[in-house]
Image (cartoon, rainbow, N blue to C red):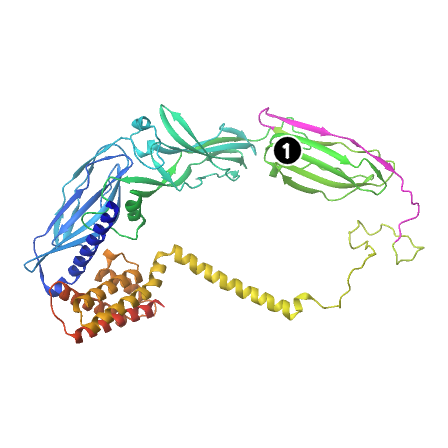
Amino acid sequence: MKDVGCKEKFFRNFFIGFLTLCLYWTTPLTGSYSDDTSFEASVNTNKVSLGETLQLTLTFQGGKIDSPPEIPHIDGLEVRYLGPSTSITIINGQYSSHVSHIYTVFPQKTGTLQIPAVTVKVNGKAFSSQPIAIEVVNAAVDSPGAGDDNNSAAAATSIKDRIFVTLEIPRKQVYLNEKIPLIIRLYINGLAVRDVQYPQFQHDGFTVEEFSKPRQYQQVIGGVRYEVLEFTTDIYSTRAGELKLGPATLVCNLLFKNSNRQRFPANGFDNFFEDDFFQGVFNNYQKRALSLSSVDLPIHVLTLPEEGRPPDFSGAVGTFTFDAKASPQKVGVADPVTLKMTVSGAGNLETVTMPALKADENFKLYDPQIKEENGNKILEQVVIPKSEKVREIPAIKFSYFDPEKKSYQTIDRGPFPIQVTKSENKDEFKVVGFDQNKPVSDTHGEEEFGRNIVFIKDQPGQFRRIHEYLYKKPLFISGWIALIFGWIILAVFYRRRQKLQTDVSYARALKAPKKAKKGLDSARKFMTEGKQNEFYNTIFKTLSEYLADKLHLSSAGVTIEAIDQKLKKQQNRRASGADLTNILNNVESILHECDMVRYALMKLDSHKMQENFKKLEEVIDQLERVGR
């Protein structure tokens, strides 16, 4: 029951404030302003905890300014503008307006801080506010996702002490192309953090692998408990010399708790379509994007030593294992033997060059096939012995530099014994279709499988007419055309649905005419029945909601100035200046006569009702044509 009453109170206050705001737009036509002008600054609280926000309000009485006042830079405080709020009072025909500009203040450190005096010009006269002292205390923050160790927050004195990023490597002197584990850690104490992005860092002179899945744990540093998010990857230096790694940057959203405990503002209205407002209403928290940076790290990259370098060394750096084997071990002359080599270990496998078997008169070699899988680099090569005199495949060596031992290492595998037998068929190889008495000799280089030898099919399969292809059949072509059109329709439907879900302005503008049609139907009914008050209330509501949706304005931001600014952007499209002026004049006229009936209790005849109804239809029709 309490929640329902709160909602009813909010909508009642919202409706009353919106009516007074619209009356304020049209006051030059019907009354006069009070000359009593003043300016003041206020905050909703003078004491907040680090991790909470406070609200700063600059209020102008009896006048207004064209743009929000700029708040000077304040050490220890970050200020973000939320929006305006307007209220009007009418006493004996005198209009008194209050225009408030609302800001959210994010404390960045503890201590007594001060919001300085703000100076503005109102109606050509300079006004200054009084400085405001703010006390930021280091109390525990009651926020979602914050740590439960309240005592651990006592040591922190600023936001930077509670959330920071570090960049770490095991050592700062490495060898060229050595694998370097890199760790980036995000430390959080007593703060609510959301939407953490993967870190980025400067790495000129290094190649970088992808980050693995981050690990989350707790760590105590100097008696303070931190939630830690750890990102790990490996990097490899590509040139020698003095290099620099970092700084690492990480972007996330920091949630600040609103210090104002009221569910809705007591005076004025925020922008209903900003994310910060909804965070404040429904979650009582506001998001603020935060970019964190670590320090950079100097790294000295050493060149590989010349002393002791094996002749077959090809640049592999790390700690590796090497294995090789040949199979089968019993073959006939011209039968293939598969030689398989495997390299694995801690190092950059992409830069590892696999050992090569040297060709000689005893073997015919085919190009090797190389692949990487499960952290291993594998080479498979087919070798064919040319004579039964072959007894073994020569030994193979793999050399690499071990940065831990600071020396070159060589692993030998082989030789690999094989037994080659002479072919039982002593006749020379012949191909069917050629002269049986003419042997086929290998005088044209290496064979091309599938071209030099074409196998005879003992089961030819199903025969079909020459030049009759599936893709030429009408049914096949029609099916593909239908599939393409169906895909296009689904793509258009999907994109439109995604746009409706993600583009708020597009969705509101699309629904605006439908909502306005319902309002027009209700207004036409009240006009036919002669119910003047209900008629003008309906057209006022219909016009306001239509303009807010069509021009993507908040309900509190539907002003003549805002409408004029939005319509001028349309002038570069299909609308002329005369059309926009006509729209603006009709809107102003409708709002003025609505105020006269609802506040000044004037009686207008049915002719006036029909005229205003027609103007409303023209406004909606013209705006719809401009938006196409």
> Would residue 84 be visible to someone looking at this image?
yes
| Residue in the picture at 91% in, 42% down | 424
- Whole-percent x and y of residue 101? 20, 49
Query: Between residues 231 and 353, which one lies in front from this camera angle?
Result: 231
Direction bottom: furthest residue: 607
What segment carries the magenta color? 402-430
Residue 406 magenta-drawn?
yes
Give the image quarter of residue 325: top right
User: Is any part of residue 123 visible from this angle?
Assistant: no
What amino acid type is highlighted by mark number 1? Ser
Relative vertical location of residue 453 with respect to residue 374 in this rendering, above or below: below
Toward the viewer: 391 or 543?
Answer: 543
Which secondary structure, mark 1?
strand
Residue pointed to by mark 1? 344
Q: Position of residue 437 (x, y in %)?
A: 94, 55
Q: Which is nearer the eye, 179 or 547?
A: 547
Q: Residue visible at 27% across and 61% down? A: 545
Residue 298 found in image quarter? top left
Residue 277 placed where, x, y %?
28, 48
